[in-house]
Image (cartoon, grey):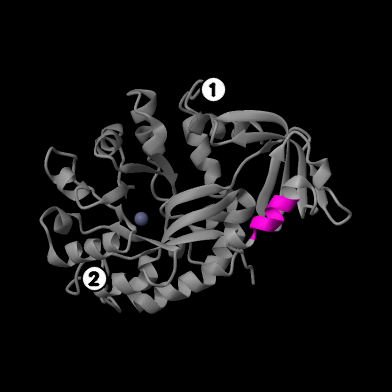
Amino acid sequence: MYERKPQFECLVPLNETARGERKATLVIKNAKLINVVSGEILENTDVAVCESRVAYVGENADHTVGDDTEVIDANGKYLSPGFIDGHCHIESSQITPAQFARAVLPKGTTSGFFDAHEITNVLGLDGLKLMLEEARKTPMAAYMQVASCVPSTSAEFETNGASIGPKEVKEAFTWGDDMVALGEVMNFPGVVYGDEKMMGELEETLKAGRVADGHYTWEPDSVRLSAYASTGISGDHEVTTAEDVIARIRLGQYAKMRRGSAWHDVAETIKAHTEHGINTRRMMLVTDDRSPESLVDEGIWTLLFATPLNKGFTLSSPSKWRRSIQLKDSD
Ligand SMILES: [Zn+2]
C-alpha cells in the first residue's frame, strides 16, 4: 500500500536534503525543467527528491547524492510536473481506481478530480467510499467529489440504487480533505430556478469550504447562466464552442475543455484563446470519460496535447500551452 506523508511530517528531512546533510532518495540530473510557476524552460537543471517530495531544484544536486541515491541522467530531456486531469469519471473506464492509476501514471497523469457519480448511483455513499479508500492506496493524487445528482434524472426514468441529498453531501465532506468538491451539478434547470434539494446541496458544499463543479448545457444567455454561476458553481466541462468558453470565463468560472473518448471539444473550444484572445488562466484540459482501450493506447494526455498543437500554437502562446508544445517536441 502506498502511503504519502503529509508535508508537515517531511519538513526536517526535506530541509536537510536540500542542504545535503541527508542524502536524497532520487536525483534527476541535466534536465530541461519546465517551470510551470515562472513559465520558463530551465536548461541543465537538477532535481533531488526525498522520499516522495521534491527537496532541491537547482544547477547542481551533487551534494545530495549518497551511496543509496538513485541517480538518473536526463541528458537534456524535458522534466515536467505531473499532469492533472481536471474532471474525470473513473468508472467510465470500467476499472477500479487502482487499475486506473496503473494505466495513467506511466503516461504522466499523476492527479485527478474524480466524480464517482456512476457507482454512487448504484451503491450510494458506500460506493463513493469504496472508490475513495482504494484511490488513497495508490500513488495517484485523487481528489474526489461527492455526486450531486443521484439519481441523475428521476426515479421515474431509472432504477437507481440510492439517492443523494444535502445530508449525504454534508457527511461525505467529513471523510477527509481529499473530498474536495460537489460533483458536476447536472440538474442545471433545478439550480437556475432554485430547486430546494439542489440549493441544500450547494449550501452544504459552501458551508464545508468546498467548491462545486458544473454541468450546464443550455445556450449561454444573459440571465440563466448567471443564475447558475451565482450559486458558487465554479467550473463547467459542457463547453463545446469558443462562445461557451468565453461566457463561462466572463462569469468567473473555469472552462474545462474536453478531449475524452466521446467528446473531442478542444479543437473548437481553444478558439476562445487562439481567435478571441481570451486569457488561458481559467481554461483547463479534462477527459471526462475514457474508454479502457483508448486509456491504454493513447494515455490521457497524448491526444489532448496533439489537438492544440494541430491548431497553430506557437512558442509565443501563454506558458500553459508552451508547456504542452515543449512536451510534445520532446517525445
Ligand atoms: Zn462529467
Q: Quick one: 212 or 151, which is closer to the camera?
A: 212
Residue under label 2: 166
Q: x, y (%) of residue 168?
A: 29, 74
Q: Quadrant of residue 10?
A: bottom right
Specify the label residue 315 is tagged with: 1
Q: Is residue 58 left or right of residue 68?
A: left
Q: x, y (%) of residue 29?
A: 78, 39
- How packed is label 2: few (under 14 Cα within 10 Å), some, or many (20 or more)? some
Secondary structure beneath disc 2? helix
Q: Is the C terminus in the top left, top right, bottom left or bottom right quadrant?
A: top right
Q: Earlier in the sequence, mark 1 or mark 2?
A: 2
Q: x, y (%) of residue 171?
A: 33, 74
Q: Is residue 294 above or below residue 279?
A: below
Q: Residue at x 51, y 22 (%)?
A: 314
* Picture quadrant of ligand 1: bottom left
Q: Which residues are magenta?
A: 10-16
Q: Is residue 181 above or below residue 166?
A: above
238 is within the stretch colored magenta: no
Q: Residue at x 78, y 36 (%)?
A: 60
Q: Is residue 126 above or below residue 219?
A: below
Q: Amino acid at mark 1?
A: Leu
Q: Residue at x 58, y 62 (%)?
A: 6
Q: Amino acid at mark 2?
A: Pro
